[in-house]
Each structure stands twice: as C-alpha cells, then as structure tokens.
Image (spheres, helix red, strand yellow):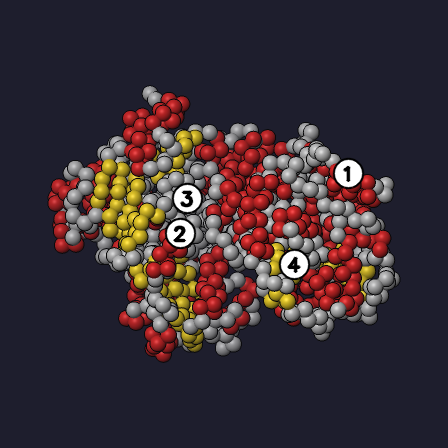
Amino acid sequence: MTTPGEVERTLRAELRGEVDFGAAARALVTMDASNYRRVPLGVVTPRDADDVAAALHVCAEAGVPVVPRGGGTSIAGQATGVGVVLDLTRHMNALLSVDPAARTAVVQPGLVLDRLRDAVRPHGLTFGPDPSTHSRCTLGGMIGNNACGAHSVAWGTTADNVTELAVTTYAGTAHRIGTGWDGAPAGLRELVGAHLGLLRTGMPPAFSRRISGYGGLDALLPERGVRLAQAFCGSEGTLGVVTEAVVRLVELPPAPALAVLGYADESAAADAAAGLLPYRPLTVEGMAEDLLGAGAAAGGSVGAGGAGRAVGLPRGRAWLFVEMPDEGAARAVARGADALDALVVTDPARQRALWRIREDAAGTATRTPDGRMAWPGWEDCAVPPARLGAYLREFRTLLAAHGLRGTPYGHFGEGCVHVRIDFDLASDAGVARFRTFSEELADLVVAHGGSLSGEHGDGQARAELLPKMYGPDVIRLFGAYKDVWDPAGGMNPGTLVRPARLDENLRFEVLPATPFAREVARCVGVAKCRTTESGGPGVMCPSYRATGEEQHSTRGRARLLHEMLAGEIVTGGWRSPEVAEALDLCLGCKGCLSDCPVGVDMASYKSEFLHHHWAGRIRPLAHYTLGGLPGWLRLITRLRAAGAVNAAARHLPLPLPGLARERALPQLAKRPFTRGAGAGAGAVAGVPGPGPGPAVTLWPDTFTEYLAPEAGHAALRVLRAAGLDVTVPRGGGRICCGLTYLSTGRLDRARKVLRRTLDTLGEVPGPVTVLEPSCAAALRTDLPALLPDDPRAARLAAAVRTVAETLEEYAPAWRPPRLDRPLVGQTHCHQHAVLGDAADRRLRERAGLVGEPAGGCCGLAGNFGFEPGHHEVSVACAEEQLLPSLRAAPPGALVQADGFSCRTQIAQLGGVRARHLVELLAEGLAD
C-alpha cells in the first residue's frame, strides 16, 4: 500500500507546482462554504494542464482520490475531500484570450469571475452567469456547479454559456469536448444510445434551474445536438478536472433600467414573478421585508410603505427587482405589473444603491431576527416559476412545523429560492431534525416539479436525496455516466453518485462546546474576505489582499482555529505554530466585523489566541514595548524624559529591540494634553471655557495625551465653540481603553487597566467623546466583553461618541465653519468596522469638504507596522488605496486621518501631514 509520504514524494518529483502535505495546508481546505468537513491527504497547486495530468496519474496509481477546488465557495460540501485537493486558483488563473467579434473568451479554471468581467467590459461584453460570489468565485467552480446568478433569466446558466472544455480524467488522459462526440471518453456514445428512451421520458420535466444531479445529461440526445461540454457542467468535480474553457460572452445593455415593484406580501410577489417573463427581463429578483432587518421593519405598514419606504423601496412588504434593457421597457413593466406600487430607476448610482439593499439582505439571511446563526444546506431549491407562490407558502408551513426559521429570497423569475435555516447541527436531536426536515423538504420540492438544487450543486447536502427527484432508473444511469468518465471512482467520491449521507461529516461535531468554538464556527466560508477588488469603503482583509495567501484571509485563519480546536490535523492546541503564523499578519483592523456577512471578529480571536499562546511564557519583545506603550509613555512623562527619548530616537544607529528597523519612532509631545487642557474644567489659552450646553467628557486617550495633544486642544476648541460644557477627566495618564494590551493578547492586563480606568473616571454625566477611533471602538465593544459583570463598563460603552456624533446629537443647531476645500486621507479601519462614519460624512458636507478619505487599511494598524517582519505587508496595504489617493489629490486638498496610526503612516510613506477632522474644523474657526 502506498503511504502518504510516498505519494507526496512522487508528486514533488513529477510536478513543477507546489505540493504541501503539511498540517496548515490541509487545515485550510477541510471545509468549503457548507456545513461539512473532510480531512484531505494533501494539497497540490498545479502550474498548468501538464501538472494536472501528472498529479491525477500519480494519485490514480496510488488509489488516492482527487478533489478539484476553486474559490472554495461551494455550499454543499463538494469542494472538500479525503484525498488530494487540487488548488487551481494560484497558478491556473489566466484569461488566455478574448475574441470580441466572436464574443468568446478562453479561460483557465482558477480565473475569478470578476477578473473576466472587468477585462471584457471595455468591449461592451460580460459573462452572463453572475452568482453573488462573483468577486471570488472561479470559472472552474462555476462550471463544476453550473452556477447561474441573477441574470440567468436572460442569459442562462454556466452550461448555456460554455462552448468547449479541456478536461483531464483521473488516469491523466486529456479530452477536448464541445458539441458532437469528438473527445468523448470510450463507451459514452454507446451508453447514451442504449438509454435514449430514458433520457427522453424518464428525466423530470425540464426547466431552466434543473441543476441537481447530472441534470444536463439529456443534452447528449441527438435532437439536442450532443452537447458534451454542456452535459459536463454541473458534475461537481466527479468526472474530471477542467483545465481550460471556451466561454460565450453576451452584450451588456448600454443603459439598463430597474423597475422595483412592491407587493402586499411574499406570496403575492412570488405569484406575480412568472407573469413578468413575457416582458423579457434581464433579471427578476425577489425578497420580503423580513430580510431587511428588524430595525428597518419596525413600525412599518403596507399603507405607510413599511420597511421598504424606510430604505427607499416602493410601498409594500415584498418586492421584485426587475431589470430591463432600457427605461421604456422598465416603465412598461411598471405599468403592466399588478403591483401595489412601483419605482423606475435609471440613474446608475441609485440603481447600485437599490441593488445593495438586495445584496445586503442576502447577508442578513445568515442570522435570524433574534441573532441566531442560520446555516446552508437548503440554500437554493428551485421550482417552475408558475409554482413558486404555492411552493413558498408550503415551505413556510414546513419550517414552522419543525420549529425552524429562515428568510427566503432569490431569483423569483426562475423559481429559485435562497434560504439559510437555523438548524441546530451541534446536538444529536438537532441533527436528527435536520435529516427529517431535509427529507420532507425534498418531497415538497419534487411535488412541485422542482429541483433540489437550483444553482449551487448537490454535494453532500442533497445528493443522498436525488432518488426522490430522479427515480432509480435515472440514478443508475447517473452511476454509469460517472463510471464511463471515471471508472476507478477517484474523482471526488461521495458526491452525486454513491453519495455520503447528508448528516455525516458535519463540521460542528469535532468542536468542543465552548463559547470560543461557537465564535470560530461562525465563519461559514463564503470567502468575501478573499476578494482582491480595490476601491470602495471595505477593509477586509488587508493581509490577504497584500499576500494572496489563503492562510492570511479571515476565512483561512478561522479554518486554522477550527482545526486547532478539533485537534486532528493541527495538534499543538493553543501553542500551535500554524495558527500563530497565520495570525501574525492579522492587522487587527476589525474589517471582518463589518464586512464579513456573518460578522467574524478575527481581531478578538487573535487576542484570545495570543492570550493562551503566550500564557506562562516570555513574550516577544514587541508585546512589552509596543503592547505596554501606555505605561512606558506615562513613565517617560513622569521622568520628564520626552526630550531625551525624542533625541535618542532620532540619533540611535540601531532600532529599539522588538521594533522594525524600517520605522522611525513618532516624536513624543513635550507636554501631555491634560497638562495643558485644564483637566477637570476651566479654560486654557486660546480655548473658550465651558459652554452652557450639555455636559460632555473628552476622553484623554493615550495617543492624544502623549503623542498628539494638538488634536485634543482642537477638540476642546470645536466642542466649546458649539456651546458644549466640555470636561477633561483628571488623571489622564491613568485612563486607558486597554487597546495595546488587547492587540497583543494580554487580556488579564487589559482587564486590570480597564478596571483602573473605571475607578479613576467615576460616573460621567453625559456623552464621552473619544478622538482616537481605535480607542472608541475598544470602549464600545471590547470593554463590555472583557468586563461583562461590571455595570460601569456597559454604561461607559453606551456613552462613547465620536466628535461628529457628539456634535450631531448634542449641538444639532451648530454650524461648522465653511472650509470649502477638497479632501483626501484615510478612514480608520475601526471607524468603518465598529463606529460607522455617517455622522462624519454629514459633518464634512456641512463644512464644505469635498471628497472622501480612502477606504481600505492604512497598513500601520497600531503596533502591527512597527513589529519586525511586517514592514513589507504594511506598505503593500498602504499602496492599495491610501497612497494612490494621496498622489492623485487635487491642489490645495486637505488631508484628514482621525487615527494616529493613519497619520503616522501618511507622514512616513506619503510625506505629508494629515490632521484629525477636529483640527481642520478648529483651524476654520480661527480663520
């Protein structure tokens, strides 16, 4: 018998691509975006089709299964396996050619869909299928699952848009298939010829979303043109590996228009969807108000517009988004539809805003209204569109009968419904209910003439139930079809044919029953963190965008933590070097807290890991120097040594121990903020005294206190000019949010510092205005989490405000000075992720500041950019959005950055001085 070590050595000898049978590589691919987990033998990243053939041949000789994998966003378990995983994203990700005249493109399987769409957009073309994971899913994965997306009502499924495929089978044999029998494996033509009657009459009624099983097998009928490539699509890696594809492109409408139709309820919208198809829409998407979230829906009514009116939708409790090629066609739909209300939108920016409502709603489906997690498994059943209303009514009844909750939405024009359900997959009783519900739902879908999968494939989640849909004769034919392509059964076994049970290999069963394990399991693997698109306000995940490595994505880190807790592959527990390496490049930006659809908080997970990882051991020097920064700064101030430290930092030939040699240390202030701010009350030179308005406490954070007191003085000037009674607490050096201790995982020290802070601060009479966004975020979220039993922590967290929030809430009549200047800079990651910047945007607008600070991450991220080994990634993060925006700044532009780290990065890498928003406003007051 061939051992794993022998397989690994043979693969290394035969391939030019990477071969990794290590714990970290295996842990990263145990799961996809489904509920399932399978442990592979190793991971291979082939460089080309020859490497794929060599890997398949080696594995076939050794009897080792193979699973091809793209972006790993499959939600049914088909991208996991127990043998060798072929990662086709690292090297085989090219757009090989585009023929605009023929409207075709030649692609490799690892090419991300958005890269194809970006490349052909200048030709007025696009690839029709557009699943919601378009920013990270790959063409190979789309072919494997026969992906569809919102526009398939006009442009069809992936199978409808593939003309040729280059395929390599398990034994390493290459095939080129398209239309006709050329390239078919031996025996396939004979198999089809022997079952013509079954293919013509034994398959379920055809409709556009019959994706389940080998649902396209009847494309091999002679009257349908023997479309081999089309039949191969949707085979979920069970027949062979696609190494190249010729895909069909479609023309982009030059000025599409959106008709948004409001209905009384979900059933009415579903009943109406099929009637809109004669208008030849580009898409018909549906959702109901329960997907908008409790905040939007509160107090709504049909007559008043309900939740929809609150977010810019027409009157109703459910909506259809109907995209048409032009305005005239959209208005015809609005006139002809039997809807309560209608809205036609032609402005592209407003269309994008409305589509974001629909896209954001898809993210909320991962949670129930009471905050419980909802899981995939029955994500995309489809029925003929004319049956959709009746199906949804019975589906809701079935959910209620099992005590389950979910919020359906989806491609109503094709009868495809997305829903995540709050299954309990961690207990025996919950798993039993999952099975019973799955069996009953499969019966319901079949009763309506539908397909168990409408676009995402069956995988392990639904393949066991395919006999309910197809019957025994067709299932036997599926097995024979698989055996013609893969007689040894080595391609993705346990999927589609001779499948694993739907209630085995569940990823939750290996986890301990701890709060941290529940948090780690929150990552469902949709891989939004793997996107490399730049621009926009999003932050997640800067280290992945800089490195392109899965282990440095939020999902990758969550997978490694999952396997650390499971203890099967990653066996070092909290001392695991694999997890430590992956978390080392986590900037703690908290971007995942807001940008991840399920709110993974990797910064908090990193703190927890470091807390355990270094328990009872000497930590890295940076944990004591940078992690203990507040204490060091307080000591330097007490010794009146700021001048000496500044001089030493300027002239030392070597960097301080534990700090990156590429970084210059920021200069310390000669005088702390609170010494010049009249701590407690009173006025100082140039700063008006307390106003007659509401009492406000200005938080003396460490950065403002010791490094940037000018921001604190500016805040005093602005807040008091607005008429507020501003107080700066005494004992500023003893007041700290604990941020640096949190970021280095010194949680016990952080708790001690926070308790001391609460004791020093006492009760505050009103809002607490915090200038440093990272400190404000720590006080709002980390403080109550670390001290859950101290009521003072919750009260302080609730009182925290940014400057803009304070002015908007407590001085609403105040008008800021008009600056009337262009603006560039950086929005702090924690502001984006935790605090929000809506109030800041409104304040800038009132002050006449034109433009927006850059999104993304500055890359310095507190102590991260000062730690050894991080400089290259830190600079790469800054080069994504921040530095280009500075270079492109118009003449006379002001540079704003509220975070001290952001200002430091801008100064060191951009060569310009950035200022806090309050500094800009204070200068305007002086002028």
Secondary structure under tag 2 reads: helix
Which mark's residue is nearer the viewer, 1 or 3?
Answer: 1
**Label 3 close to label 4 by CB (< 8 Å):** no
- Position of 402 relative to 717 (above/below): above
Q: CA distance from mark 2 to mark 1?
A: 49 Å
Q: CA distance from mark 4 to mark 2?
A: 32 Å
Q: Say what amino acid the circle numbered 1 marks.
A: Ala
| Front residue of this view, candidates 98 and 484 | 98
Judging depth in this view, the residue of 717 and 134 nearest the camera is: 717
Check disc 1: other Cα within 10 Å, few if <14, some if 14-19, many if 20+: few
Q: Nearer the viewer, mark 4 or mark 1?
A: 1
Q: Which residue is mark 2?
A: 115
Task: From the top left corner, tell me how far across and down residue 802 is, in percent.
Answer: 69, 60
Q: Which residue is mark 1?
A: 648
Which mark sits nearer the N-terminus, 3 or 4? 3
Q: Mark 1 or mark 4, which is nearer the start of the sequence?
A: 1
Residue under circle 4?
896
Locate residue 794 relative to residue 489 in the image: left or right. right
Mark nearer the viewer, 3 or 4: 4
Give whichever of discs 1 and 3 has the lower sequence position. Answer: 3
Locate the N terminus and report the quarter of the image it occupies. top left
Q: Is there a contact, CB below 8 Å, between mark 2 and mark 1?
A: no
- Point 84% across, 66% down: residue: 689
Q: Residue at x 69, y 51 (%)?
A: 900
When asked about the image quadrant of residue 645, the answer is: top right
Q: Nearer the viewer, residue 547 or 752?
A: 547
Q: Residue at x 64, y 59 (%)?
A: 895
Per the model, the C-alpha gap separating discs 3 and 4 is: 39 Å
Q: Which residue is mark 3?
A: 72
Expressed as whole percent of the image width and height from the top left, the position of residue 784 reads 69, 50
